[in-house]
Image: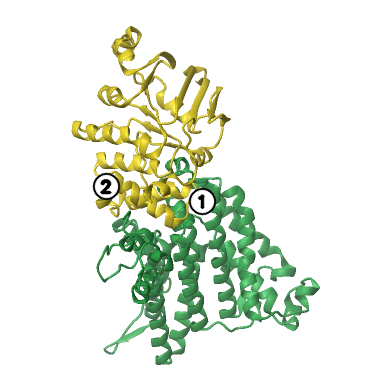
Amino acid sequence: MAQTALQSGVANTPDDTLEAFDISVHFEGLAAIDNVTIAMKNKEVFGLIGPNGAGKTTLVNVLTGFQKPTQGRVVLGGKDITGWAPHKLGRGGLARTFQAVRLFRDLPVVENLEVAAVGTGLGRREASKRALDILKWMNFEQKAFDQADTLPYGEERRVGIGRALAMSPRFLLLDEPAAGLSDAECDELMGVISRIPDRFECGVLLIEHNMRVIMGVCHRIHVIDSGKTIAEGTPDEIQANPEVIRAYLGSKSEESRA
Amino acid sequence: MSDAAMDRPDTAAVRMVAVVRFFWTPIVLALFGLAAVVIVWASGDGVLARTITDALIRTVLVIGLYIFIGNSGVLAFGHIAFMLIGGYAAAWFTMSPFKKSFALDLPPILANNEFPLFPSAVVAGLLPALVAAIVGIPIMRLSGIAASIATFAVLAIFYTVYSNWDSWTFGASTLVGIPIYVNMWIALAWAVFAMFVAYIYQQTKFGLALRATREDPIAARAAGINIPVQRLIAFVVSAFFMGIAGVLQAHFLGSLIVNGFWLGITFLSLAMLIIGGQRSLTGAVVGVTMVSTIVELLRQVEAGVEVAGVIFELPGGFQELGLAVLMIVILIYRPAGIMGGLEVPWPFGGNRRVLAGGFTIVHAERTPASE
């Protein structure tokens, strides 16, 4: 029953893809992203890592319509969606979270999720049901009727993910979901993220600095530095990649030089 | 709500309780209005009857404002334009051809007819709603202070046009001879209707989506919500009730003057909404009640009150001063208004603290998530 409610709306198919080809974003001449190409599949957890300022959030903004690329194409399930408005992409199956969480603070937790369900075209009753189902799945139904701005930080982040899931997305884009979480909360988060693809039949793009989370849940990892792709591979390959190690260690000394 | 019975069979009584609980806020507010009207009616005090009629018309007005401002969070300064449009439309439709011939030079269909009162009122409310649908298309794309100023510009435009449109509005002069039929019962009926419509709207997915855009526009867009469209829906519904308030006022006073739809009423209506609490329907109604009561008391003291043989009298202008001071005090101590976004609480157990959108709270307590 719950399962069917969650799957209504956009059809999620096993061969669904989200691709970005040759994406470049220039801010007044400076390249925030330079010719980055990524491709991810349904039910895949795809990590996007890189030092601070590497352009990860800018790439997510491009994928979700908040930033128009200077060059390149975004393709969802074979359809060119470059330049679509954010709300249209949301309805089309791309859900995201924000580093700053951005809950609807004055609304109860459950309505935060409902808004997202309603935004993808559900009626109030189905939205209400879906929201409560997801909160239950996240073991959070006891706080369903608390006002969102009364939650502690870690729980806010959890509601942010729940809200994105309430859109029944084809692809879920998580922007640093572990930032500021305790180790215990990180473990719980990893559990939630790794269970998402099967439960919601969607792909997950994960931006994260916490390497334990990244290495623990990602199937493939894409590394960018200063807007450019430097590596892509499985967690084991990435951990052994000298370029990646240099980027992470090197960026520290570059920062101190700047 | 029959929909609440979706998951398990309900008895008629259980369903009845759910309906009452769902509509608890407008029911309580309507009963409050009814009680006030019945008391005044029983007292037979004609002056008080006029005062309460006036307050009920203001209730329609402030609920109209609330539907847009409360749910969208966009402070609009130009809504009195819709009251102006509604009021004059009512005059065009309902004045007798004989009376129209003195002041107005209307096209034959309006000049030679007087239309039935109730349909005229509805059409006179729909006209500003139509205007809102048109001017709203560009304005609803703006945000923050730009949107507020743009709505004020709309008022400035209509105010200027109506002040100079002699053949339709009698210019800046007072237009008299509008049929007088609005009493406290009719004003109450419209106020109750406005309460229910505003409440039902805020429980729909449209109301919920608009409140989300108020809380965080960026997250709302990411959640699939088209902000200009959601704002426009509220703007149009809001304009209808603003128009109806103008219609009621025209048929209550029997006269209209364009100057009456300018800054004075704009400030008063916004003050009522902000003092009561702009984020809940209850706040809107509480604001009207409180401000009307205080203004009326101050007015009486200005006229002179005798207490134990001593006559107290305040200098003129105290009403306005009192209102301004009250607003400042409220803004300092309760920036979210007296109600602070809360609706009438449900007193019979369960989750008592009902926020502006209590749909799921009411719904979910009866239909547990998955079974």
Residue A73 visible in image: yes
Residue A253, horizontal then vertical, whole percent: 29, 10
- Vertical placement of residue B106 versus A128, above or below: below
Tell me which corner region of the image, top left, top right, bottom left or bottom right, holds residue A73: top right
Palette colour of chain B: green
Label 2: state its secondary structure.
Answer: loop
Mark 2 Cα-neighbour bin, 10 Å: few <14, some 14–19, many ≥20: some
Chain depicted in yellow: A
- Give the left or right position of residue A228, taking residue A160 as reference: right
Residue A207, horizontal then vertical, whole percent: 36, 27
Label 1: state its secondary structure.
Answer: helix
Q: Choose between B349 and B13: the one closer to the eye.
A: B13
Q: Mark 1 points at which residue?
A: B148
**Amino acid under disc 2:** Phe
**Of the numbered discs in the image, which one, if any, rests on residue A140?**
2
Residue B290 visible in image: no
